[in-house]
Amino acid sequence: MKQPIAERIINFSVKHRLAIILLTLLVSLFFFLQTLKIEINPDVASLIPPEEDVTQYIREYGLEEQVNYETLLLALFSDRVRSFDLGELALFYEVIQDLKRLPRVINTIEPFSLITFQAQGRRLEPVPMSPQGKPPATEEDRILFFKNLEVTPYAENLVISKDGKALMAIFQIERAEDYKNFMEEVEIHVSKLEGKIPYALSGSVPFLNKTTEYLSGDLSKLLLLVAGIILLLYYLGFRSLRAVFLPFLIIALGTLWSLGFMAFFGFSLTVISIVTPPLVLSLGSSYCIHLLNQYYRENPGFTKDSGWITEATTHINKTIIFASATTIAGFLSLMATSIRQTRIFALSTSFGILACALLSLFLLPAILSFLPPPTLKQTSRIKEGIISKSMSVLSRFIIHYNLYILLFLAVILITFLATLGKVTFNTDTISYFPKREPVVQDMHKITRAFGGFDEVYITLEVPPEEENFFLQPENIQNLIKLEEQIFSIPDVSYSLSFPSLLDYLNKLTSSSTQTPLTKGSALLLSRYLGILNTSSASGSYFKSLVSEDHNRIILKLRVYNSEENRFMDEQRMRDVAEEITKILETETPEKVDSFLWGNALRFLSLSRIMRKDLILSITLSILVVFVFTLLAFRSVKFGLFALIPLGSGVMISFILIVLAGIPLDMTTIMVFSIAIGVGVDDSIHFILRYREQKALTGGDRDAVISETLVVTGRPILLTSVSIVIGLVVLGFASFKPIAYFGYLVVFTLTATCVATLLFLPAVLRITRS
């Protein structure tokens, strides 16, 4: 009879063990060299798909320059209004100049050189807030400086706080994957303020830098913790050095291969893929446990023939093959999602899982063949240990309380349906950090003073045939009223537009606040803005307020949570966006089209995309896993039975998410696809053994269930405990998405394990299968 291909490959591996070991070392060396090139990308905005609506709009209209930068915020604080003395202002200016000279700084908006306007009769003269754009040299200059800031409406909440107790410089920074060196230079220069004047340093650049620190720090910390826990579990489970170090070698190589795979294809570690290494370490350990459990069970005692190792591996290879295949299928279901980094995570982790499965089936037996057989005492511990005895007790419990177990399963289903619509999503990156983190506290401090830095833009545009539309006085007046209505929204802390700026300058040249706007004054301001943009660094802040043909204007807004005096969360941003949209729909002048855009709104789209991806990935993973179970059992009935444990685990996790108030984000939405792929492994193992036991003994149903639990309960429990305890360390991560991911995947896989050992036997018993 011809041997199955898997058995022939396993037999080849044992016979040519040196070649297999050498080949593994060469491949591992290649991947190790690749890992030296891997980088960390902390930018959450990079997760947003390029086809997202706001992103497409920004690209179509060439508005990337408006949003394609990161920010660095430096603010000074005082206890009294406009009380900064000459020395403090000079020191602030010195630090600003130091920072402006740093290589990545694109543009700076700061209080000394920000342009204001002075009226010379009916003429306007653009001048810096402070004489010559430098810090005030005399007390008279200091008074003039603060007076200019006070009377210039667009300076408030931009470079000076509304209460006059804080000054700010805003640096626009070129985007990069790593800000470590840049922030080190920033902190050297800013340290000049230390102990001399209260200040705060924040912005997206410090947050991105901290994200990198957390991701790299969490990665090394978590890998060490996971490795230590897995080593301990191997020892407790088998009490044998070979059962500790050899499996750990397998999963360490699998993890190395997955990281090398990422580096080889130029993939970076992101807030999503950072969990790949600990996942591969934990999930890959289950294949070694299955093989070792069979290895010890079939130990013949003292013999020099290694053929029994081939037989033991062959007996368990189907379980490992289908378990790894369903796990990989769960991950690869994420390939259907819109977020590129999620797809990269799916590919890289799948490759790592595949590597662990292949190394378990071929490298592990090859190494074991060099070693003498285990002692009979070790074999006895596997067959008659406390776990096997507890499985006998569990089988009696299931038989006695079968209907109550099924009733409990029904309660879970009803509760799940009642809580399904209450799951929340979160894309607020600031909430990912510990509240005591200095960069978070500084951001709170700056937000309280200046009203937040979430930027929102409104484009107002008319058809090309409406020549010079936004130079017409009546049109400008209508837009001024529109802007005033939007600015009356409490959460809008700042606004700037061509019409409001024109209104301010028009009033500046007249003693009457009712002086009508003219087309000539509008055209003059448009020319001023063009001159400012090319002649002044701070003048670029006025760029794109109006197009050259005066048929398109942009309204710049900043928003924040006015009730709590802090930055916006996702729901608050959504509410404000809806309120602005309603005003635009009802108050925008005829012929004018409006569009609301900005990075903050791109994140709202990311939340919508995550909802869609969650449903798609769960549906696809269930379908793919069901196909695999059909192939494994060649039975629709048993294929459906295999879905019961993972379905229970997913439902229980949804209930936990709602009750605990845990939001889903770009990392945690992957939990369910992963849990479906991993959770079905146990049920496949259980059903395969159940059918084998039933075919062998032909005994009654209760006896078959009891024997199946005794034989499979140990590896199922050990693999689940290994994975769960290995991943529970993710909960110790400093970065909240990783911690939440750890909590949810641990809880879900625990639930699927319990469901396999409790619900699945109860269903098999009552259906007489």
Image: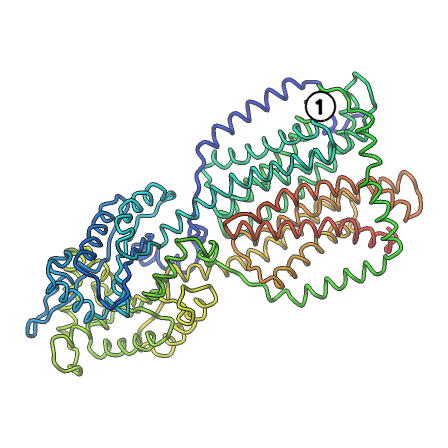
Q: Residue furthest right?
A: 699
Does residue 628 appear to the left or right of 193 in the view shown? right
The image position of residue 133, as x and y in percent, is 14, 57
Residue 526 in the image, given as x and y percentages of width and height? 17, 66
Label 1, secondary structure: give it.
helix
Q: Residue at x 43, y 44 (%)?
A: 213
Q: Is residue 552 above or below residue 351?
A: below
In this rendered view, identify the residue nearer to me: 218 or 267: 218
Q: Position of residue 351 (x, y in %)?
A: 58, 37
Q: Residues within 10 Å of mark 1 (few under 14, many from 20)?
A: some
Q: Residue at x 51, y 33 (%)?
A: 260
**Residue 766 horizontal side relative to residue 287, left or right:** right
- Count of marks placed on residues: 1
Amino acid residing under circle 1: Leu
One can see residue 317 in this view? no
Which image quadrant is residue 248 in? top right
Which residue is outermost to the left? 121
Front residue of 694 and 708: 708
Classify residue 245 as left or right of residue 169. Answer: right
Q: Which residue is mark 1?
A: 368
Residue that sits furthest to the top in the current view: 304
At horizontal 70% and vertical 33% (from top left) the residue drawn is 235
Is 279 displayed left or right of 520 in the figure?
right
The N terminus lies in quadrant: top right
Residue 710 placement (x, y as % from top left)? 84, 41
Residue 332 visible in rendering: yes
